[in-house]
Image (cartoon, rainbow, N blue to C red):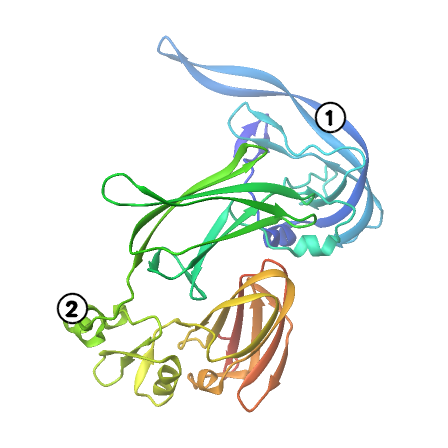
């Protein structure tokens, strides 16, 4: 913390929507009716050295903050008895002596205010934002925001992968940019991929892609596809707005052949060569199981892996990651990319790519829910991106079937069976 005349001002650290919701004394949407500039004469004292002698120096400055009068349209947390609120612009500091206000609003702006404490000053959070009149307040408030500026990931064969891909199969790259406005914004994405040839890099992909965040949405999503040959690659992505750089990043990845050779792919030979059983690599269409008898590895089909586990023949990896080939599922507003199961805690995680609000209906086979005898799915909890939600469940002959609503931008849905005896599986 930095101290100025016994008044503390903090460096602004962005907060997540969940943190803002929990820590704000009140949250409301309203229209600014007037702006009053408040000025405070302040002084900062610091120590300097001159001719080997330390001395205190006092530097005076004027702190100017805007104070807004607001006609409240709707309280979203902790409703007050009045529909007239007065709030003050926050003061932030990046370094000593560099103190000022942040986020200026104007008369007529419709703003969602997060107010941390109702102390007479009613200072609002820098995360407060303007909402266009066409945007539904609660939809905007619950939308997922990116934790860092720019978020990208890649998918191959329906599975999210970091940087090691299979050659001669298409890779789907997805870039998400938080545009920090709800008024809509257009971006240009320039993607440049080169292959390492040992001398000078070979340009193998060069494309400019138009991206747009629609009004009332925070995130602009862009997709492109590239099919690599075997080798090492570098991808440069530059995002511009009106020919000015908005953000940029570099990603390196490799592609290897998926040709099956006995020397490379045999799980037993890998194991005998010194590779730990849980690090053995299987073909993409097979799953790794560790034999209960001698802890040696085996690569089998997904449904076989589940059945061998229920019989006690072997153990699944934790987490067990597979495609959705075993599950009866239907989704609106997005698509499913991956299914994860934790044999130890009985947690089920379903990775999705949500493009709008929607619903996921999914039946978890009994061969999955029966793997851990200490957990039951008669009682369960469901969370979407960490937020608990209410869902409908129907018991079917195949297994428990869930209908789960989600919002635009949702990435992960988790179903948690409850431990027999009353303790949750968290």
Provide the residue designation for mark 1.
38
Q: Position of residue 233 (x, y in %)?
A: 33, 48
Q: Position of residue 349 (x, y in %)?
A: 49, 70
Residue at horizontal 70 percent and vertical 56 percent from the top = 139
Residue at horizontal 60 percent and vertical 55 percent from the top = 144
Residue at horizontal 60 percent and vertical 71 percent from the top = 331
Residue 345 is at least partly visible in this image: yes
Q: In this picture, is 389 found above or below 186?
A: below
Q: In this picture, is 342 found above or below 120?
A: below
Left or right: where does residue 397 sit relative to residue 165? right
Element type at mark 1? strand
Provide the residue designation for mark 2.
274
Mark 2: few/some/many CA within 10 Å (<14, 14-19, 20+) = few
Q: In this picture, is 32 found above or below 261?
A: above
Q: In this picture, is 75 found above or below 410?
A: above
Mark 1 or mark 2, which is nearer to you? 2
Q: Quadrant of residue 203?
A: top left
36 or 121, which is in the foreground? 36
Residue 426 is at least partly visible in this image: no
Q: Position of residue 424 (x, y in %)?
A: 51, 75
């Amino acid at each position: 913390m930095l101290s100025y005349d016994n008044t503390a001002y903090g460096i602004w650290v962005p907060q997540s929507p969940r943190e803002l919701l929990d820590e704000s004394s009140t949250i409301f949407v309203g229209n600014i009716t007037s702006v009053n500039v408040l000025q405070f004469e302040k002084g900062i004292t610091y120590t300097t050295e001159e001719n080997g002698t330390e001395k205190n120096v006092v530097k005076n400055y004027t702190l100017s903050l805007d104070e807004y009068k607001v006609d409240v349209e709707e309280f979203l947390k902790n409703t007050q008895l009045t529909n007239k609120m007065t709030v003050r612009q926050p003061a932030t500091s990046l370094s000593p002596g560099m103190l000022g206000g942040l986020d200026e609003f104007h008369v007529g702006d419709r703003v969602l205010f997060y107010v941390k404490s109702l102390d007479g000053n009613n200072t609002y959070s820098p995360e407060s934002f303007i909402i266009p009149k066409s945007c539904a307040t609660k939809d905007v408030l619950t939308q997922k925001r990116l934790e860092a500026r720019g978020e990208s990931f890649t998918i191959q064969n329906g599975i999210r992968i970091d940087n090691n891909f299979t050659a001669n199969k298409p890779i789907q790259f997805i870039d998400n940019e938080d545009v920090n406005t709800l008024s809509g914004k257009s971006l240009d994405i320039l993607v440049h991929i080169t292959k390492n040839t040992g001398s000078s890099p070979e340009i193998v992909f060069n494309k400019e892609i138009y991206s747009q965040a629609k009004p009332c949405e925070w995130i602009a999503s862009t997709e492109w596809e590239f099919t690599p040959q075997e080798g090492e690659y570098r991808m440069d992505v530059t995002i511009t707005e009106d020919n000015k750089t908005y953000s940029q990043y570099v990603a390196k990845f490799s592609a290897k052949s998926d040709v099956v050779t006995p020397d490379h792919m045999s799980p037993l030979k890998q194991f005998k060569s010194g590779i730990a059983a849980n690090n053995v690599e299987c073909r993409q269409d097979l799953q790794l199981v560790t034999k209960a008898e001698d802890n040696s590895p085996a690569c089998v089909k997904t449904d076989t892996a589940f059945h061998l586990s229920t019989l006690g023949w072997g153990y699944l990896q934790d987490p067990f990651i597979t495609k959705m080939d075993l599950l009866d599922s239907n989704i609106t507003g997005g698509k499913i990319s991956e299914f994860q199961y934790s044999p130890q805690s009985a947690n089920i995680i379903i990775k999705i790519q949500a493009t709008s609000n929607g619903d996921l209906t999914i039946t978890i086979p009994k061969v999955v829910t029966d793997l851990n005898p200490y957990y039951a799915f008669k009682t369960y909890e469901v969370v979407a991106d960490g937020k608990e939600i209410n869902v409908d469940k129907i018991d079917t002959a195949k297994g428990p079937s869930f209908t789960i609503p989600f919002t635009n931008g949702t990435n992960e849905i988790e179903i948690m069976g409850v431990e027999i005896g009353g303790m949750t599986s968290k």
